[in-house]
Image: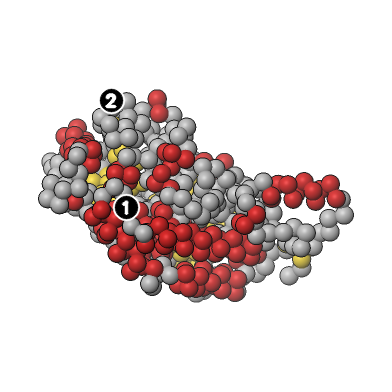
């Protein structure tokens, strides 16, 4: 491979670049020094050795759009074995849709595209709904996969993930992550099947924007799509709460009015208990209605990453028939691990469940649940026990570092990192909402590792003092 190493003879250009990098935070976290390090450009793509690939071919090279899904053929090549699938595919995401590297949602189809078809892709269990996530603003390329793999490792079920090189109609699109879509399934969210004849069955809901089109607009509230909390962010009863729960399973078009009322009553009972003086009662308190272990694992995964969307957007919950309310699965960590330049997200210190105090003007806020739970000695004791157990193995500094190193060895051996940044020449450039802008992929990884070490050590100090 050939490399072009530009020399910055123009001092004014260098000065502008230094200002752009330095404005992203304190010197202790600015790990790239452009005076000693040059940005790497690739003048030709590296050829992969043996890396899983996907090629999507649309009818007549038709462009993939946000909606509706269009028909296409998916060709998956792994270990020199080629498998073809019929799919319906569309662009997915909210703010990420503005990036030139898109993410996609697709369904596997029958031979005539008339119906959905369960298949196995990437060795995962058979299903019909899949996601191809394209890391773009996350220049480490691994934040989502790292988080999901860690969550699965601690026993808190998350989507399975796998790296692929993607091309669409022969155009290479770089490194992607195949992900299982969150849905009711014995191998995904294992809850009872719901139907119109029952109310006490399986449900998946999420705290999110209250409209089907994802508008950042609380006044666009659509009651057919979601319902409001009866409590504000301070735990006071309110008819104008800006906490919304979106129906995910059953889907808004399928859920009955009785089922809507039932899941509303489950959430309202939990919040009413939390708002009461006896919320921590061992018999009649919050433990009566929630699976505390899932709340603790959800808390840990969002806090170790300091996920700026955690607790307030893409926050999934589920409940099985006659069961307790559970948190999860986790979702959406491309902005985590310090990859944001707003709301103190870049700082490895500070609790993200306190987001409302950090960013009170943000329209999407965290429910009062977490501050209230952190007032409970029993909840904090269980959190401490779980934290100490995980820090001794799966979430230890060496364990996380070795997991990252394993990703890098795999990706570098197959030269797909070079390929990705040949296609998307964004190293050394600010991409919203980057806090840190590294001139090489290695510096992006060094920042990520350093940030994680600082974050976990800060949490050690906080939790050990509970």
Which residue sits at x=27%, y=31%?
236
Coordinates of residue 224 in the picture (x, y in percent): 29, 30
- Say which of marks 1 and 2 sits in front: 2
Residue located farthest toward the right when viewing the structure as drawn: 9
Which residue sits at x=62%, y=69%?
415
Classify mark 1: helix, strand or loop: loop
353 w.r.t. 399: above or below: above
Q: Can residue 283 be seen here?
A: yes
* Quadrant assignment, res 341: top right
| Camera-side residue of 190 and 336 | 336
Residue located farthest toward the front when viewing the structure as drawn: 465
Q: Which quarter of the image is occupied by the C terminus?
A: bottom left
Coordinates of residue 227 in the picture (x, y in percent): 28, 33
Visual colour scheme: secondary structure
390 w.r.t. 380: above or below: below
Q: Which quarter of the image is occupied by the N terminus?
A: bottom right
Circle on res. 65 = none
| Camera-side residue of 162 and 351 | 351
Q: Is residue 89 left or right of residue 1?
A: left
Which residue sits at x=60%, y=71%?
412
Q: Can residue 248 be seen here?
A: no
Coordinates of residue 184 in the picture (x, y in percent): 27, 52
Circle on res. 239 = 2
| Camera-side residue of 425 and 208 | 208
Q: Is residue 413 left or right of residue 332?
A: right
Crowding at mark 2 (Cα within 10 Å: few <14, some 14-19, many 20+): few
The residue identified by callout 1 is: 328
Classify mark 2: helix, strand or loop: loop
Disc on the earlier residue, 1 or 2 = 2
What separation in Å lies between label 1 and label 2 (alpha carbons)?
27 Å
């Amino acid at each position: 491979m050939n490399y072009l190493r530009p020399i910055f003879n123009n001092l004014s250009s260098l000065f502008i670049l230094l200002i752009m990098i330095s404005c992203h935070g304190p010197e202790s976290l600015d790990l790239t020094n452009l005076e000693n390090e040059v940005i790497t450009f690739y003048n030709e793509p590296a050829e992969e050795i043996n890396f899983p690939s996907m090629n999507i071919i649309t009818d007549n090279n038709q462009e993939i759009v946000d909606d509706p899904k269009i028909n296409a053929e998916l060709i998956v090549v792994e270990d020199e074995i080629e498998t073809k699938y019929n799919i319906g595919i569309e662009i997915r995401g909210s703010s990420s849709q503005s990036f030139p590297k898109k993410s996609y949602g697709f369904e596997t189809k029958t031979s005539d595209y008339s119906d959905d078809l369960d298949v196995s892709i990437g060795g995962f269990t058979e299903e019909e709904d899949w996601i191809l996530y394209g890391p773009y603003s996350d220049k480490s390329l691994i934040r989502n996969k790292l988080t999901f793999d860690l969550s699965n490792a601690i026993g808190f079920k998350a989507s399975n993930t796998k790296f692929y090189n993607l091309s669409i109609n022969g155009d290479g699109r770089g490194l992607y992550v195949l992900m299982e879509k969150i849905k009711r399934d014995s191998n995904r969210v294992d809850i009872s099947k719901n139907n119109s004849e029952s109310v006490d069955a399986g449900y998946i809901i999420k705290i999110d924007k209250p409209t089907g089109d994802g508008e950042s607009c609380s006044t666009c509230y659509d009651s057919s799509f979601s319902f409001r909390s009866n409590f504000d962010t301070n735990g006071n009863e309110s008819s104008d709460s800006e906490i919304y729960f979106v129906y995910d399973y059953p889907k808004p078009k399928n859920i009955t009015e009785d089922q809507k009322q039932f899941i509303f009553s489950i959430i309202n009972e939990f919040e009413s208990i939390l708002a009461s003086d006896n919320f921590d009662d061992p018999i009649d308190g919050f433990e009566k209605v929630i699976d505390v272990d899932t709340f603790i694992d959800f808390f840990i995964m969002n806090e170790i990453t300091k996920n700026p969307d955690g607790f307030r957007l893409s926050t999934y919950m589920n409940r099985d028939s006659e069961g307790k309310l559970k948190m999860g699965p986790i979702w959406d960590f491309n902005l985590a691990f310090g990859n944001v330049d707003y709301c103190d997200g870049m700082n490895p210190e500070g609790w993200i469940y306190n987001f409302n105090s950090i960013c009170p003007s943000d329209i999407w806020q965290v429910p009062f649940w977490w501050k209230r739970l952190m007032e409970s000695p029993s909840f904090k004791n269980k959190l401490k026990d779980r934290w100490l157990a995980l820090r001794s193995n799966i979430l230890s500094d060496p364990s996380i570092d070795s997991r990252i190193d394993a990703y890098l060895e795999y990706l570098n051996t197959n030269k797909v990192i070079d390929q990705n940044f040949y296609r998307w020449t964004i190293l050394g450039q600010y991409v919203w909402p980057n806090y840190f802008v590294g001139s090489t992929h290695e510096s992006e990884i060094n920042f990520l590792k350093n940030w994680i070490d600082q974050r976990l050590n800060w949490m050690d100090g906080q939790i050990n003092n509970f």
